[in-house]
Amino acid sequence: MLAAGALQTGAPASVLVVLLFAVTLAYPSDVRVTYGAYALTLLGLSSAVPTFVAAFFSGALADRHDRARLMRVVNLLSLLGVTAAAADLIVVPGGRLTFPMTGFYLPVWVALLYPCWATVIVGATLFRPAFNASIPRLVTAPDLGRANGLIYAVSAVVGAGATLAVGLLLTVGNEPDALALSFAMFFATQLALLRIDVDLTVRRAAARRSVGAEAVEGFSYLWRRRELFEVTVAALVVNFLSAVALVELGLYVGSWLGLSEGVWYGAMVAASTLGVAAGFALVSQFTFEPRAGRAIMGLTVAMGVALVALGVVRSVWLALPVIFVYGMMPGMIMTIFLATVQATVPDAMLGRVFSADEVGSYALVPFGQTAGGVLTSAMGVQGTYLIAGTSIAAFGLVMVVGFGALRRLGFHPRADEAPPGAVAS
């Protein structure tokens, strides 16, 4: 389970490095900041609708079927998407799609990458609720923080290594060579999933209803649990603002830092991912459970400050440690959230709550990516990072004052207590 989760979580990041690098350099330097920004925005938008549809139903599917079997099936989707992207980058179909009255154009081979990326992300989106809902079937409540920290720390290290490796492959080779590593990771995930011999079938007391009706139940439950609803609202805002800046990371490296080699872009993504891993590992060493909500608020403010710092530094040797610190914050927040939900939500509802939160948390990300392209064209790379970072820090302070239920969020696990619905200790 650890190997499957680490590989499947880390592999999409390596695919994204390759696609962002390819799309950014698809345009000559004189229009890269403008046309490249728009093309990167379209890359993000290309997966938006398929991802939200998949996220809406993913939890209901995870609460209806054997979760191990479901994870095997959806991982094959990611394998298909990577294979198609590699084929496109090998053939490189000619021609361009021109947008009237704007001057903006899209190379055909770039446009064909968009459905490939959407397929990879849909597979990962369907995978996550089933995987996260399986963890409390294996450990007791006091161990959830450490278990999630370990799993996702390893995932982040694998992802960081993969992004750095594809960056090197992009420097010494080409895009299909780099995607071969991503394919190998998804293939290894499939092998690991085939070796899972734990019964992950969901035990349900209520009769099954339609997938759509059961998916809606997850949203209803989230609304009734006001503290979890406020976490989702907070994530909605923070993810939007983060997307504004991070969708332009390729331009940050190429334009603001003045580096065109793929290894530097891979290094930035790897440093961020290693920061996430450190966040996963460190937060599990503290007793965060009784004050989970307050910890999330403080980490949000720190996340905004780190993003502002990225907009100030001009050296990659300063940007690398700053983005590492930035990555620690979402890693810590995610561990706290996962452990709290897994410890307090019944097993038969767990997948739907995770998917409902995911839909709510990421609903504005495509709009954030769009805003990032527009803002970068108007304000430049530095302006985008300063505005996004300041806004996140300010919103964290708003949370402290106005999110009362979140401020009280926490739980007190007993040593002999298993999460609701757990079938293993």
Image (tube, grey):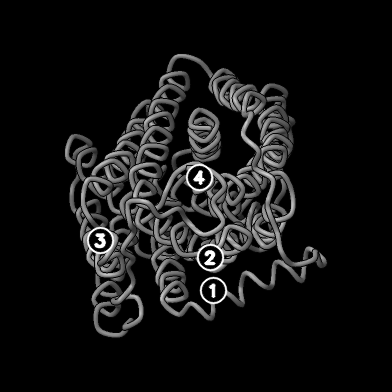
Mark 1 crowdedness (10 Å alpha carbons): few <14, some 14-19, many ≥20: many
The residue that mark 3 highlights is: 299
The residue positioned 69% from the left and 72% from the top of the image is: 216
> Quick check: 212 above or below 193?
below
User: Between tags 3 and 1, which lies in front?
Assistant: 1
What amino acid is at disc 2? Asp
- The kind of secondary structure element at disc 4 is helix
Quadrant housing residue 69: top right
The answer to whether mark 2 and mark 4 are in CB contact below 8 A is: no
The residue that mark 2 highlights is: 357
The residue that mark 4 highlights is: 135
The residue that mark 1 highlights is: 222
How far apart are the two marked residues, 2 and 1, measured between alpha carbons? Answer: 7 Å
User: Between tags 1 and 4, which lies in front?
Assistant: 4
* 241 with respect to 83 (left or right): left
* 201 with respect to 330 (left or right): right
How far apart are the two marked residues, 4 and 3, measured between alpha carbons? Answer: 24 Å
